[in-house]
Amino acid sequence: MSNRNYSIRQLIQIQACTNCQACADVCPAVAGSFDGKLSAAYRLEVLGRLVKARTGFWRRLGFVKEPTAEELRAFSDTVFRCTLCGNCRQACPAGLDLTHLWHSLRRDLVASEAYPGKIDMIRENLDESHNVFGEDNEERAEWVEDMPDAPEHGYVKERAEVIYFTGCVSSFFPLAQRIPMALAKIFDAARVDFTLLGEDEWCCGFPLLGAGLGGQLDGLIANNVEAIKARGAKQVVFACPSCYRMWQEHYPQEFELFHATEFLGRLLKEDRLPLRELDLTLTYHDPCDLGRGAGTFDAPRDIIKSIPGIRFVELSNHRENCSCCGGGGNLEMIDASLSANIAGNKMKEVQATGAQAVVTACQQCVRTMTTYAKRNKVPVEVMDIVQLINKALAGED
């Protein structure tokens, strides 16, 4: 391991933890596993010792020793069983920037060859197939073929005003493909001039950050930027919060970026989407990357409240304090059982509201919560906000 993976500010913050355990109280991984070693407090305690062990002054005094390979692997197991939801950062009374610190820590562990084997799979899939699942990237827009009355061009055009950047999950997972289908129908109804990138769209790179491989982003970023420039578009819309946040924080700021909730909110204000009444009681789950990550809380709620007939009830934990669905941080690949436990806790919170449906604004949240609900016969409908709007479009079933 090397202290060079951390900024000076991060090295200071590592030693600034007061061990108050506020992070453990809100950690979805701790609640889902009953294992305190998955908390930020434990992680910081061990990391603090490791940083000192690599510092000549402390090592010469003999106060700390370099960890063995076995100890490092055991620590790595706690580090990668985390959704990177950012709730620990939100709860930290000392204001420590924990989310970015975890990215640095994962990068450190990968460089030290102490990481889960699935990380190699993520790296290889993105190198060879340009998507996190290792699917044939030429099939990235094949979901259009399942749409009735899809245009002949399949929404892949040479020029357009708006790019819909679909993301890996919505492109390849059948359950999540309902989201891009719904958004395409909404765009058609509002007469939005948009195009997909098709096979020219590569993964945004967000899984690389979660895998500790942030140094390998350049090729993906360059490809996606050039693909959009080639189509003459100035605006890019994302239904995936992780893609949206990735573009905000790591891509050159050459385009106007919108999460779908922001873009659709604008269409509603322009009266371009006639909505019919829906007799439905629902609650809203704030995706981690859209809420705590990107600070977008009001746009989805404004959309929900604009639909006639909707009865809206908040979760007990909402907005900045919303609990994770279990789908982030590559956790589903690393520990599927823990991911499911976290989803179970989320769905119990949803059921406590008495809502008929839970709406979110993230395809991964939809996948995680829907999978749990189906496997455990939870009588709550799960849908993306894009699907909700499509449901409310005049004349739509």
Image (cartoon, helix red, strand yellow):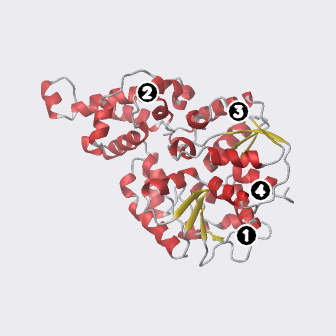
Label ID, residue 191: 1
Query: Along the horizontal axis of the image, is 315 left or right of 220?
Result: right
- Extreme-front residue of the structure: 270
Q: Nearer the viewer, residue 394 or 126?
A: 394
| Three-letter residue code for mark 2 | Pro
Viewer-nearest of labels 3 and 2?
2
Q: Are marks 4 and 2 in contact (CB under 8 Å)?
A: no
Please provide percent x and percent y for residue 12: 28, 34
Residue tagged 2: 93
Residue furthest toward the left?
Answer: 60
Quadrant for the N terminus in the image:
top left
Q: Crowdedness of circle 1 by 10 Å Cα count: few (<14), some, many (20+)?
A: few
- Residue 361 seen by the camera: no
Residue topped by disc 4: 390
| Residue at mark 1 to residue at mark 3: CA–CA distance | 35 Å
Between marks 1 and 4 in the image, the one whose residue lies nearer the viewer:
1
Q: Position of residue 183 (x, y in %)?
A: 70, 60
Q: Is residue 119 above or below residue 227?
A: above
Q: In this view of the protein, can residue 309 be seen by the observer?
A: yes
Q: Which tag, 1 or 3, sits closer to the chain's start?
A: 1
Residue at x-position 21% and y-position 25%: 64
N-terminal of the two: label 4 or label 2? Answer: 2
Lower position in the chain sequence, tag 2 or tag 1: 2
Helix, strand or loop at label 4? It is helix
Residue on which disc 3 sits? 350
- Which of discs 4 and 2 lies nearer the camera? The answer is 2
Q: N-terminal of the two: label 1 or label 4? A: 1
Indicate the amino acid at tag 3.
Val
The reply to whether the C-beta atoms of the residues labelled 3 and 2 are less than 8 Å apart is no
SS type, badge 3: helix
Disc 1 versus disc 3: nearer the observer: 1
